[in-house]
Structure formats: C-alpha cells, structure tokens
Image (cartoon, coloured by chain):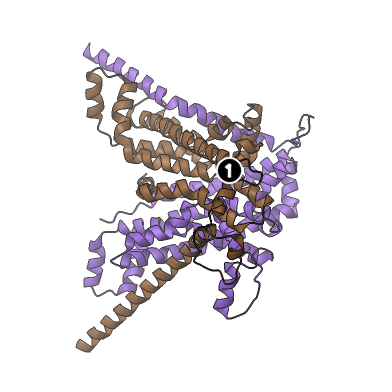
Amino acid sequence: MRHKRGFSMERKKARWGWVFVTPSLILFAAFSFYPIINAFYESFFNRNLLSLRPPSFVGWNNYTYLFRSKEFWLSVQNTLIFTGGTFLPLLVFSLILAVFIMSISRFRRFFQMAFYSPAVLSSVVAAMIWLLIFDPRGLANQGMNSLLGTAGVNYNWLSTTTMLRLSTIIVYFWKYIGYFTVLFVSGIGSIPDTLGEAALIDGANRWTMFWYVTFPLLKPTTLLVSIMTMIQCLKTFSTQYMFTSAGAPTRPINVITLSIYNTAIKDYRIGRATAMSILLFIVMFAFTWLQLKVSRTEDVSHM
Amino acid sequence: MNANKTRAWYLEKTFTALMWLFLAGACLAVIIPLAFMFTASAMPARDILKMPYPWIPDGIYWQNFWNALRGPEGTFIFARNAFNSLLVSGTVAFFTVIFSSLAGYGLAKFKFKGRNLVFMLIMATMMIPFEAIMIPLYMVAMRMGLQDTYAGLILPFLANAFGVFLMRQYLITFPDEILDAARIDGASEPRIFGSIVMPSSGPAIATLAILAFRSQWDSLLWPLLVVQSDEMKTIPLYITKFMAETHSDEGIMMAVAVMASIPMIVLFLTLSKYFVNTEGLTSATKG
C-alpha cells in the first residue's frame, strides 16, 4: 500500500516536471530548432525576398557560388583579421591588468570598475563616441600628433583599409578589456594564497611565481576566455554596421555578419544569405563545442 | 647579505611603482572616451571641434539635451523610442526569468523520463548563434505577422538556454527536505515554486534579469530586421538613423549617447556585483 502511494507520487512529480519545462521547450522549438532546421533547408533554394515566384531547388549552388565568390572570401578574411587582431591583444592585456590588480593592495575594486566601465555602454553608443574621436579633427589625430610630435597629420582612421580595420579593433578592445580583466581577476582570486606563500618561502620572486605558479593555474580560465573572445569576435556586427552607415568604406570591414545582413536585406537573396549563415554556424558550433568540452575537462582543483 | 636585501628591496619598490604607473595609465586611456562623451554632451558643437579639445565645458549646454529629445522634426520620437527600448528590455528580462526558473526548477528537482534529453536539447541551443539563424527567424516572424510589432521584438528572446542552465545550477543544491515538507503540508507545486523557490533565488534572478535586460538594450541586428516604422524603433535603431541623417551636430550626438546610457549607468552603479557573472562562469567550469 505504502509502496503504491509512493509510486503514484513519483508519477505525479514527473508530470509536474514536464509542466515546468514545457513553456521553455515550446519557445526553443519555435525560435531555435525550427529556424536552424529551416536554415539548412532554405540554403538549397534560391528564394528572393521580394519575388512572388516560388523558390526553386538549386542543390549546392548557393554554396559553390560562395566558394567561388571573391566578396565572400573577402568577408571571411575581414572577419579573421578582426578576430586575430582583437583576440590576442585582449587576452594578453587583460591577463597583465588582472595580475597587476591582484598584486597591489589597494584600489583593486576601483580599477576593476574603471576598466569595466566601457562595457556598460551599448555597442552602438560606443561606436558613436569613437566615430567622433576618429574624426579628422578629433581626439585620435590630436593624441597621435602630440604623441609623435607631428603637427596636423591626418591618420585617416576611417578611410584607409588598414586604419579602418585598426579602428574597429580599437573600439572592440576598449569595450571588452574590462570584462576579460574581471574574469581573470576572479580566476586569480580562486587560487589559494597558501600556494603563493609557499612559493615565496621557497625563494621565488614575482616573475618566477607568476610563470610557474599563477599562470599554469590560470590555464583553464585562459582557455575559456580565449574561446569566448573568439566566438564574440566572429559574430561582430554593430561597430562595423555603424561605421559603414556613417560613411566609412564597406569593403575593408565587411565582416561575415554584415555581409549576411546585406545579402538578405539589400540584395534580397535569402538562399545565399542562409548558406552563409550555415557556414558561420558550423564554424561557431565547433568553437562552442570546444568551449563546453574545455570547461568540462579543464577543471583544475587547487587543493 | 644586507646589501643584497636592500637591492631586492629597491627592485621590489621599482616594480611596484611601475605597476601602479601602468595601471593608472591604462585606466586613463580607458576613461578618456567616456570623459569625452560626458564633456562633449555639455558643449555646443563649435567647442567640441576646437583643436585642441577643451576638456572643461563652460557650464552645461542644456540645448543639446533638449534638441536630442525633440529630434530634428520636433516629434519627440526619441522619447517614444526610449520607451520602446525600456518596454522590450523589461518584458524580455521579466519573462526570461520566469521561463528560465520554471525550466531550471523542473530540471533540477523533478525526475522524469527524458529529463536528460530535454536538458541536452536546451544546452544544444547554446551552440546555435543568433547571427546564424537570424534570416530564417526573420522569415518565421514575417509568416507569423510579427513584423513591426512588440511581439516580434520580444518573442524570440524569451527562451534563454544560458538562463535555464544558470537557474538549474543554482537550484540543484536547494534542499529537497524543504520542498517535501511543503508538499506534506499540502502546498501545491505551483505554490511551492512561487512562494518558496522563487523568493530564495534572488542572486541568480538578479544576474539573469540584468543579463537579459542589457542584451536587449544593446540589441541592434534583430530590431534592424524586424522593425520598419519610426514609432516602433528602439534606441539603437534611433541612433543609427540619427547618425545617417544629421551627421552635423556633435553636441546633440553626445547628448543622445549620454541619455541612451543612463539606465545602464544607473544599473551598474547600484547593482555592479551582478554585472559580470563570474559565478555562472565558474559553475560552468565545474559542469
């Protein structure tokens, strides 16, 4: 009797479990699973956004077109330049800043808040501020001229290919440096003090302590931060969109997301745009899978 | 021995000084653009373009803020767009918390057939970047007649895989005895969820709500696709349009920037500990 009651209670509980997860499942089905399956499907058709004709099946044509298209490879190249140019400096500088913050005894919180503050602004606002700074008469030219002792040189922040790419990287670097610094700070904070004290008693100086104690223990954080930064950089959009809509040339900073947007909305080529989306999805899926795998296996215990 | 000690002492002091110098310099470099935004918003455009830039404004030039609010056509569309942004971000934050806690609670505290599959499926959506599904999603929204509506702006973001994950991790350690005691007292499951589980998840809810609110406040790509009329625009869309039209008055531009940032600055100054979710990250690390 008791056994039976317990059994029915378990079943009742199981039903409630389903009740709690169902609303989310319906939303995920409609706004995540259906669109991604639909994306695979659409990428084999040549749907035009405005045309009333039913889209025709074109097989792998959208993909072969992309692989032969110079524009597509340029956008891949732009995305890679942006990702490479942003990811490495971000990683190195946020690590340095975090180590320095944790080695000083006062103002730790102040420095963290200060470095983090740009991340509070939305990326559109950030782009707007920097558009004014990169203006020919703006702070960027004034700063460079006083730094290099030149007078009235225009560094063309928003017009030449290299400078324009550099400018988008600077905006991104500025906005996210604090975020990754804070992540590293909490990573360092989770290393027990006793390890450092033991090393100091053994006669380690600051450098050997960083290189042989702190840095190896930060490996999981470093890996996680690296992959997170790369994922973020691969889908960059706002800065590039703002810069081009304010009149900067599109070609040097036509990153893949901007290219998908323009292919779908300006050229109405839905099939081609979804094929690009699928390629982006595959690359990012690989990175995210790596991130999950890394965060599972790289759990280092400091005990 | 003594001489050695002093040398090490000097080295140590020099290194500390250099570290402070580096931190202070980096801090200054990060702050300068922010300081520029605030000071320039208080200056007439002719002062902003002076070379060198005059860092201290002569009083606050309120005209910038008034003109920014009024808009170029005097329609006060900025206020309407700011309201849209608040409404969309607030609604998304509210319902994200509700749906994520429901699902997180269900996954953490109930055993049912297929639970692991459900969890895996939800986690799998974390691997689908929004940027990759935006075009198919846009087609879905068009077919459902969601173009240019609040529903179109809000619905796709109510289900949040990270939110489900966060709430599940948070609730998994919640003591079962308390839940069972409430059940024996005859409390219904929804009641237990509403008056026991939710009230004791404060920190996780705050983190999630801020995360959801910020990502909507910042969102540009989806509103660009789904919104057409000026009335339905959110602040990021207002700004892109504003930048394309009036590329002239820098003072008004920075006033718009400041006003667009006020809610975030207020949140940051009051709730900064929930801004960077290092706990979520470490719990992700612990898997």
**As drawn, B2 above or below A66:** below
Residue at image point 54% right, 77% down? A147
Indicate left or right for A255 with B36 as reference.
Answer: right
- Looking at the image, how many numbered discs can be counted on the residues? 1
Crowding at mark 1 (Cα within 10 Å: few <14, some 14-19, many 20+): many
User: Which residue reaches farthest left?
Assistant: B2
> Residue at 35% across / 47% down in the picture?
B279
Q: Which picture quadrant has residue B93?
A: top left
Q: In what quadrant of the picture does the C terminus of chain A appear? A: bottom left
Residue positioned 48% across, 33% down in the render:
B91
Residue B130 pos. (x, y %): 56, 41
User: In this rendering, does residue B216 appear at all?
Assistant: yes
Specify the subunit that label 1 lies on: B
Q: Which residue is mark 1?
A: B78
Give the letter of the purple chain: A
Residue A170: horizontal and vertical position, in percent?
A: 55, 63
Name above or below for residue B69 compared with residue B36. Answer: above
Task: State the image coordinates of residue B70 (x, y, percent, origin top left).
Answer: 60, 45
Name which quarter of the figure residue A251 lies in: bottom right
Q: Is residue B160 visible?
A: no
Out of B154 and B65, give the one closest to the viewer. Answer: B65
Quarter of the picture containing the N terminus of chain A is top left
Vertical order, A167 against B176 (above or below): below
Q: Which chain is brown?
A: B
Along the line of sight, the residue nearer the viewer: A128 or B116: A128
Q: Is residue B46 left or right of residue A67?
A: left
| Quarter of image, res B146 | top right
Residue most toward the top? A1
Viewer-closest of A117 and A178: A117
Please give left or right for residue B143 compared with residue B83 in the image. right
- Horizontal side, residue A162 vs residue B213: left or right: right
Q: Callout 1, which amino acid?
A: Phe
